[in-house]
């Protein structure tokens, strides 16, 4: 039995995909759960609707996407009461995300009691980052008491595309070093050495690192004190502005990369400056991770922006020939799998991410039934 149902539960949505091996048998999104005129009154009704419309015969396992595994989960884990309790303990680290996953897990265990359920964590792939890459230089008692450290996110995506990159290069994963750039609404960069994450740009939460659609990425933490003491914003207002009104939206007034690109093409100076900031941040991380890895085989772009935006890829990597990095304009314009010229020391790749497939494979591996 190789059928896997992947569930990605949001606070008011349930995204699902049913796999047989790597083949997608069904997929969908039940949304506005609990809202007037929404698709379902609650997550239980949403899952019931899925079960009424999708044939789940022969289902081997359900894989749940869980955003935060803290330092308690370093791999995908078969769910039992204890696992649920531990994910609950991690809610303070991911107050927006983990409660929704717990709701999805709860209804799936009730409605599909005979099917094993597996939690697949966005953080787990980064559990191999060495201490010097996860610790901040703050009071260590405070840090250990409150779990203040880098965890990293988008792990299923970085894991999948770094493996696919090795396959593309025809090299064993264990001998391949890759910088993976997951550029979607959320965005993160990861340094992968021999298949293991050794550095990543997101931190304790998915707020730090690269410029994102509405998230600031890296800032001086003193901005928070200043906004509170001098500008008079409450902590909730500061969180709101840094997570929902910053990034592309904050700089350009638009959170969609396509629109920002179109505006720049039409001569909009604010859009141009926004993109310069976006590219500059990316280049800083690429440079840092070249130094962390020492030897890099490939730089791989993925997710909505990474897979589809030639200007972003060119804007990030132009002028780096002395570092062995180049982008071929025609290959780039065609979104080809390899966009660097033949013979450049570092291969630049575009690999579509498959987070749901990776979750399905992880779920199968966790119950010991490799497909
Ligand atoms: P994701 O979160 O991976 O779905 O990515 C969403 C982001 O991808 C949005 O900012 C979109 O504007 C961006 N995107 C999708 N298609 C393109 C494109 N052709 N060019 C630039 N950005 C794109």
Image (cartoon, rainbow, N blue to C red):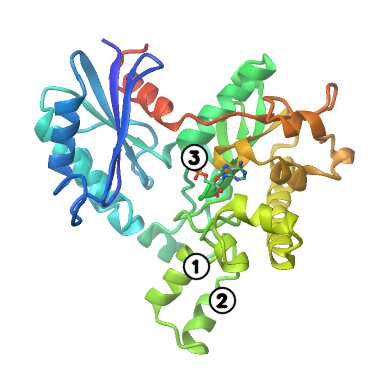
- Picture quadrant where residue 289 is located: top right
- Picture quadrant where residue 222 is located: bottom right
Q: Local crowd at mark 2 within 10 Å, few (<14), some, or many (≥20)?
A: few
| Quadrant where the C terminus is found in the figure | top left
Q: How many marks?
A: 3
Q: CA distance from mark 2 to mark 1?
A: 18 Å
Element type at marker 2? Answer: helix
First along the sequence among labels 2 and 3? 3
Of discs 2 and 1, which sits in the foreground?
A: 1
- Say if 113 sits above or below 127 in the image: above
First along the sequence among labels 2 and 1? 2
Q: Which residue is mark 3?
A: 126
What residue do we see at 22% from left, 33% from top?
79
Q: Which residue is mark 1?
A: 245
Residue 359 left/right relative to 243: left
Q: CA distance from mark 1 to mark 3?
A: 27 Å
């Amino acid at each position: 039995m190789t059928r896997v149902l992947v569930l990605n539960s949001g606070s008011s949505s349930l995204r699902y995909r049913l796999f047989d091996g790597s083949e997608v048998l069904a997929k969908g999104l039940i949304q506005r759960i609990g809202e007037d005129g929404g698709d379902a009154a609650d997550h239980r009704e949403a899952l019931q609707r899925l079960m009424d419309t999708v044939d789940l015969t022969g289902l081997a396992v359900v894989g749940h996407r869980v955003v935060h595994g803290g330092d308690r989960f370093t791999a995908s884990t078969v769910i039992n009461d204890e696992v649920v309790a531990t994910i609950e303990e991690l809610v303070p680290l991911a107050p927006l995300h983990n409660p929704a996953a717990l709701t999805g897990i709860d209804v799936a265990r009730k409605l599909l009691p005979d099917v094993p359920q597996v939690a697949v964590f966005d953080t787990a792939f980064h559990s191999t980052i060495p201490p010097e890459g996860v610790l901040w230089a703050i009071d260590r008692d405070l840090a250990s008491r409150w779990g203040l450290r880098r965890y990293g996110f988008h792990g299923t995506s970085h894991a999948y595309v770094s493996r696919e990159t090795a396959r593309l290069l025809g090299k064993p994963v264990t001998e391949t070093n890759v910088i993976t750039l997951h550029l979607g609404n959320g965005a993160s960069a990861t340094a992968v050495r021999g298949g293991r994450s050794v550095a990543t740009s997101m931190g304790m939460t998915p707020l730090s690192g690269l410029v994102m659609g509405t998230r600031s990425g890296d800032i001086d933490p003193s901005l928070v004190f200043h906004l509170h003491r001098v500008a008079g914003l409450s902590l909730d207002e500061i969180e709101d502005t840094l997570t929902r009104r910053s990034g592309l939206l904050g700089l350009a007034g638009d959170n969609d990369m396509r629109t920002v690109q179109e505006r720049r093409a039409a001569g909009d100076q604010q859009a141009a400056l926004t993109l310069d900031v976006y590219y500059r941040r990316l280049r800083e991380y690429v440079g840092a991770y070249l130094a962390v890895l020492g030897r890099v085989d490939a730089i791989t772009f993925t997710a909505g922006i990474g897979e589809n935006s030639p200007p972003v890829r060119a804007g990030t990597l132009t002028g780096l020939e002395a570092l062995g990095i180049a982008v071929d304009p025609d290959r780039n314009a065609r979104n080809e799998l390899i966009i660097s010229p033949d013979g450049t020391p570092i291969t630049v790749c575009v690999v579509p991410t498959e987070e749901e497939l990776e979750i399905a494979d992880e779920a199968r591996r966790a119950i010991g039934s490799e497909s």
